Image: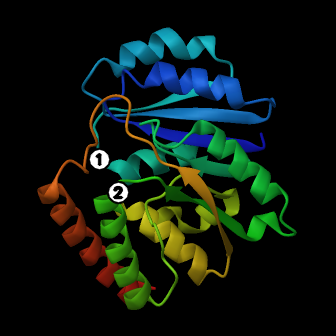
Amino acid sequence: MKLSIVVPCYNEEKNIPLILEKFQSVINRNDVEVLLVNNGSTDNSQTVFDELVPKYTFARVVNIDENQGYGFGITSGLNKATGEFISYTHADMQTDPSDVLKSLGIIEKQDNPIHCYVKGDRKGRPLFDQIFTMGMSAFESIYLGKKLWDINAQPNIFHKSFFDSVKLSCPKDFSLDLYFLYKAQIDGLDVIRFNVVFPERLHGESSWNDGFASKWKFIKRTLAFSFKLKKEL
């Protein structure tokens, strides 16, 4: 398998059919697999998975009984990946699945793809979200001494050896995106960014980005992890 794509799904029953159909329309090779992580969903996701996934040869499900966080869901899927390269993206359809295949094309064209980390750079977001991202990016870049821009952008793709080197230290929450991007730079990987369009969410609600209170909680959690990260690395 060349590429494993991990998609964490928490209460995404309406988006699951769209995800599967979209991936089917963009996967044009037989060495790509999609791992849909049922990240402790409490809606009807399991039933949807059971009914639909067997119809798609490229897809399989990783089940987690209890939600332990965004990062835990992703790493649970990455641990099951069989691809030489592994990627993850969100299930909310705000990142086009075709962008994941685009990222594979980018990394395959590099002189040393094993030594690369490819990540999206979101365009077309609401102004407030852009300002929020700019503020967080500026702080992280100055504090940690690395270029850490649009940290939570999707998709992400890297060689399996990178994940093997960091998997024992992965945070369970949204700090995972920061950890991967920072560690890739600490390890001297070539970080390559490419533009991705970021439209409105089609179905469901974000599990964290639903107002000022959630953003403030996210800020405090990220700052605490940043202090720990700088101390340890």
Q: Nearer the viewer, residue 227 or 219?
A: 219
Secondary structure type for disc 2: loop
Residue 137: image quadrant is bottom left
The residue drawn where x is 50% and y is 57% is: 122
Q: Nearer the viewer, residue 104 or 54?
A: 104
Q: Nearer the viewer, residue 16 or 3?
A: 16
Q: Is residue 189 visible?
A: yes
Q: Are marks 2 and 1 in contact (CB under 8 Å)?
A: yes
- Could you tell me residue 42's position as x and y percent? 24, 26
The correct choice, above or below, for 93 with respect to 181 in the image is above
What is the spatial separation of the Cα atoms under label 2 and label 1, in whole angstroms? 7 Å
- Could you tell me residue 76's position as x and y percent? 47, 45
The residue drawn where x is 64% and y is 45% is: 100
Read off the residue under disc 2: 172
The mark nearer the N terminus, 2 or 1, is: 1
- Could you tell me residue 103's position as x and y percent? 69, 52
Q: Residues within 10 Å of mark 1 (few under 14, many from 20)?
A: few
Read off the residue under disc 1: 68
Secondary structure type for disc 1: loop
Which amino acid type corresponds to the residue marked 1 in the rendered image? Gln
Which amino acid type corresponds to the residue marked 2 in the rendered image? Lys
